[in-house]
Amino acid sequence: MSAASVRAEAKRLLALSLEGGVVSSELVGAVLAALTKSRSAHQLRPLLRAYLVNVRRELARGEARIEHAGPLSAADADAIAAHFAKALGRPVRPVARRNDALLAGFRVRVADDVTDLSASLRLANLAKSLS
């Protein structure tokens, strides 16, 4: 199989793994079971790698990874995720992680989009403007 055909097949498998636009663990298991029965080990390895990349990318699209400096309540994390879900037009769930290097504020990553509202970024931008 060529690299292009592997990527195309992995995209098709990802589409089979979605339920309501969200990756379903049951459907992923069914796809993997069907693949192991129908493909040789030689064909399976590159296809599984491409499929894994697609599944990880799709999972990241559904997560708002929130880095915060101070305390962040579950209600605040949910509100941040709801804001991004509304803006993006798809369900987004919050995943919060403390990062004291931000000093204050927060940074949110949804897939490849990053919104940085941290004090450390503001201070860095101020330092650049003064030099």
Image: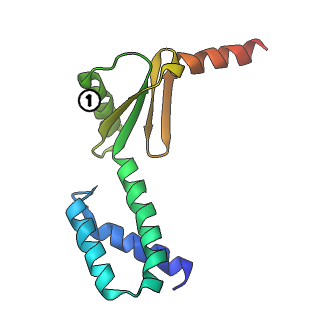
Q: Nearer the viewer, residue 126 or 72?
A: 72
Q: Residue at x 65, y 19 (%)?
A: 124
- Residue 90, position in %: x, y? 30, 46
Give the quadrant of residue 16: bottom left
Relative to 100, is 67 above or below? below
**Residue projecting furthest to the front:** 41
Where does label 1 land, which residue? Answer: 78
Q: Nearer the viewer, residue 69 or 127?
A: 69
Relative to 20, is 123 above or below? above
Relative to 5, is 75 above or below? above
Give the quadrant of residue 91: top left
Q: Residue at x 46, y 76 (%)?
A: 45
Describe residue 49's horizontal placement relative to residue 22 as left or right: right
Describe residue 67's horizontal placement relative to residue 127 as left or right: left
**Residue projecting furthest to the right:** 131
Total count of labels: 1
Secondary element type, mark 1: helix
**10 Å neighbourhood of mark 1: few (<14), some, or many (≥20)?**
some
- Residue 110, position in %: x, y? 42, 41
**Residue projecting furthest to the top:** 130
Q: Nearer the viewer, residue 70 or 128?
A: 70
Describe residue 99's horizontal placement relative to residue 122 as left or right: left
Relative to 33, is 21 above or below? above
- Looking at the picture, the colour scheme in use is rainbow
Image quadrant where one finds the C terminus: top right
What's the residue type where badge 1 is placed? Answer: Asp
Q: Residue at x 51, y 86 (%)?
A: 1
- Residue 123, position in %: x, y? 62, 14
- Residue 116, position in %: x, y? 51, 27
